[in-house]
Image: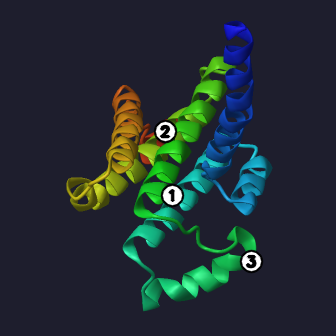
Amino acid sequence: MKMRSVFRSLSGLLPVLFLALVTAAAQDRDHLTAQEVELIREAQELDKRIDVFIKAIDRRMLGLNGVTQSNAKQLKKDAEKWGELPSGSRTDLIKDIARILDEAITNIDDVSEHDAKNPLIAKALRKLAAEVVKVVEQLKPLREQAKTDSEVASFELLAENADSIIAAANKLPPPADKKSEKSKNKPVN
């Protein structure tokens, strides 16, 4: 008899737990807009794909820092291709940036697994590292103001991804100087 009572109580809780899980999953937002996802799909070369990730990060930084008169014109110009500026709380936008960085890392890792000598890896990683340094510097004041656990966690994830990108970029050999390469290929008279 007690077993049936326990079973009935548990079976009554299962729909509630299921609903809670579905609700929590629905609240987790996509870190990229539909237009950004499409632009990433279209960008088949790694460096072009990283450019899309960088632009997506810049758009979230605009959301964090606010739109000014000078960048409002660019936003209107970009709206057709990129869609509306992503919105959300400060925590949402920081988490978006962290997840975009994570996806960029995954893309670079995937290319390096299939073709470790691909010259676009170094080019893309340098571009991404330069963006990361800029973003981390701009977000320092906001990080110091983080109040909620989720905001602190978002900043920590962002910092972890940023550190990973910068460490990988620091392991790259220095970029080849294009002028010296041209002079090496020039015939000597």
Q: How is the rendered protein coloured?
A: rainbow
Asked if labels 3 and 1 touch by Cβ distance under 8 angstroms, the answer is no
Q: Earlier in the sequence, mark 1 or mark 3?
A: 1
The reply, left or right, for residue 28 in relation to residue 95 is right
The residue that disc 2 covers is 125
Q: Position of residue 165 (x, y in %)?
A: 41, 35
Asked if labels 3 and 2 touch by Cβ distance under 8 angstroms, the answer is no
| Res. 142 image quadrant | bottom left
**Residue 15 in sight here:** yes
Q: Position of residue 86 (x, y in %)?
A: 58, 67
Q: Is residue 175 above or below residue 43?
A: above
Alpha carbon separation for disc pair 1 and 3 = 18 Å
Q: Position of residue 101 (x, y in %)?
A: 50, 43
Which residue type does callout 3 highlight? Glu
SS type, badge 2: helix
Of badges 1 and 2, nearer the viewer stands: 1
The residue that disc 3 covers is 80
* Disc 3 residue crowd, few under 14, some 14–19, many 20+, Cα 10 Å: few
Residue depicted at 70% across the width and 72% down the height: 83
The residue that disc 1 covers is 57
